[in-house]
Image: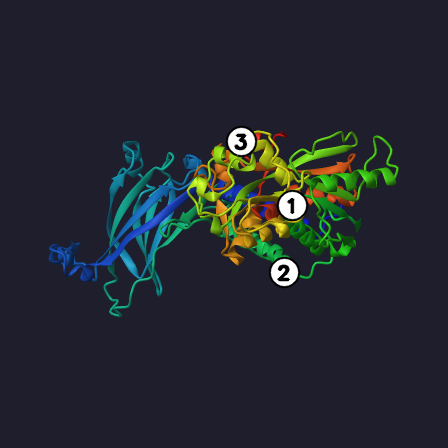
Amino acid sequence: MDLDFDNWVAVISIAIPSLAFFWEFAVVGRKRLGYRVQMDALAADATQSPYAGVLRDMQRDGHRLKDPSFVLLRIENAGSAPIEDSDYLTRGNDPCGITVTFRDRQVAGLVVTHLSQPELETFFTPEDEGFGYRNVEEGDLRRGVVRLPKAKLPLRAEYKVLVVLERWTDDDTGEPFPRPVFVGAVGGPRRWFEPLVRYFRFKLARTESHVFASRPAWIGIGLLALAVVAQSVTLFLPENRTPLDCVGGTLHLNGSTAFAPAVREAAARYEEACQGADVSIPIDEGTFDGSGEGLADLEKAGRDRKIEVGDGLGDHITFADGIVGGDHARVLSRAIAYSVFTLVVNKDAGVGNLTSDQIRRLYAGKITNWSQLGGEDVPVHLVNRHVTSGTRSALVARVLNRKQPLGPTVENCAALEEDTYGICEVDSTQTMLETVAAAPGALGYSEVSSAAAKIKEDEHLVQLPIASQRATLDAVENGDYPYWQTEFAYTYGEPPAGSVAAAFLTYLTDQGGRDVLREYGNRLCSEVENPYVCEPT
């Protein structure tokens, strides 16, 4: 199996933290003895203490201690398993497990100040050779050495030892003392592999700094960070490869004018992402001519190609607002998302809200002047989409109780008379919005994001709530807003695997096209909480 750069980075990104985890918690961290120096202070540093005089006057063998200092040591089980006497690094017959060396200081005395469990007391008896101290003078090297026993430490067990020290009697330098050095005492010859085996079983670790992890684990984390950075850098490098689902060829789109803005944007981004695959999606002013017309064009393309039953057309997709009525035995539909629609009215009408009953009466011709609803004395001008429009079908099905609006009174909306009630029809969402904005008393409908964009441009256009509910995705899913419709993608048969139509549908529902649909106010059917909003009606 061939792996490219990104695959290798992904493998390394998984392997490194896995190895670091295994090292930290299964190898090193399982048996770990921790130590802390909780205090290392000179008696001279305690001048503000009420016991300062007592500390300075401490004596040993009849003489006052020279520059006395006090060190509090804490030894703890910092691993994930109990520590046994056989885990220490010293030979089995040596009762000492840890030595703490104080250079340039000699030990005057020590005492155990805290035991987390009473059972630990047996390791600190006076006759126990594993616990005690000695002072060593070898030429210029002087040191005090504290011996700590091979104490058995259950999980989270600890003990503390207070060590009293002084400067050597003939040392008048007054220099600061070096920090104590902790080691696992080693004694006697052994087989060559024992130190290595015991290192993996047991480790003495400084825990006074509350380190997050051991040095090997930090190295692993650093390598992981470098791998992530390396993979991130590739995002900004020129991309010569095409995305996984890019397929070459020309794709023909058609259908809903309400859904068109989102599909146009998704098509443009798909072409840009698939430049290396030689993809073309031609779109112009007449590409989207309505749900019904788009479905008719799709069926014609399939018949012209003489697509056999069981096969599919791989370069045509039609989008429709809802299920298109009629007999369409060769086409397949798939729910993509749902869109919210809204009523729009010319500002001169003087209304800001309509109930569902008022809307039905308007489209039934029972209200002809806005003054009948408390608005201005302005005649009603109904602007409808053609009967094959999906936006109109949604209005009929979900708001008008499946009753069609009255037919047009004029052939062209430009022929509407300002002081006379009238009805006209248009062929696209954009034309609908422009007509309503220009005609006093006009009432129409549109996909909500297109209406919102037009309202920003033209102050004469007003978006109407229905029964005081505004057109939002949440209002639809809560069952509070009635005017919406599922957007379907229609294909002539099942698009062949590897066709440009199949690739674009995948992009639209599972890849970058999802973000485009969200940007245009749609909600994907795969993301809805209430599945009824994507069921065919």
- Residue to which mark 2 is pinned: 236
Q: Is residue 339 left or right of residue 467?
A: right
Sooner in the amino-acid sequence: mark 1 or mark 2: 2
Residue 237 x/y as whole percent: 66, 61
Q: Nearer the viewer, mark 1 or mark 3?
A: 1
Up the image or down, 477 lies above or below 162; here it is above
Element at badge 2?
A: helix
Q: Amino acid at mark 1?
A: Val
Q: Could you classify mark 3 by the number of other residues whose Cα lies within 10 Å: few (under 14), some (14-19), or many (20 or more)? A: few
Q: Quadrant of the N terminus?
A: top right
Residue lying at 46% horizontally and 36% vertically, measured from the top left: 355
Taking the view exactly as shown, the residue that stands out farthest to the right is 306
Element at badge 3?
A: loop
Sooner in the amino-acid sequence: mark 3 or mark 2: 2
Give how far apart the Cα atoms at labels 1 and 3 are. Answer: 42 Å
Q: Nearer the viewer, mark 3 or mark 2?
A: 3
Give how far apart the Cα atoms at labels 3 and 2 are. Answer: 39 Å
Q: Is residue 152 left or right of residue 262?
A: left
Q: Amino acid at mark 3?
A: Asn
- Residue to which mark 1 is pinned: 410
Residue lying at 78% horizontally and 29% vertically, measured from the top left: 329
Residue 530 x/y as whole percent: 53, 31
Q: Are marks 1 and 2 in contact (CB under 8 Å)?
A: no
Q: Nearer the viewer, residue 530 or 394?
A: 394
Decide if residue 251 is in sight here. yes
Element at badge 1?
A: loop
- Residue to which mark 3 is pinned: 530
Decide if residue 526 is in sight here. no
Residue lying at 50% horizontally and 41% vertically, measured from the top left: 471
Residue 386 x/y as whole percent: 67, 41
Q: Quadrant of the C terminus?
A: top right
Q: Are marks 3 and 2 in contact (CB under 8 Å)?
A: no
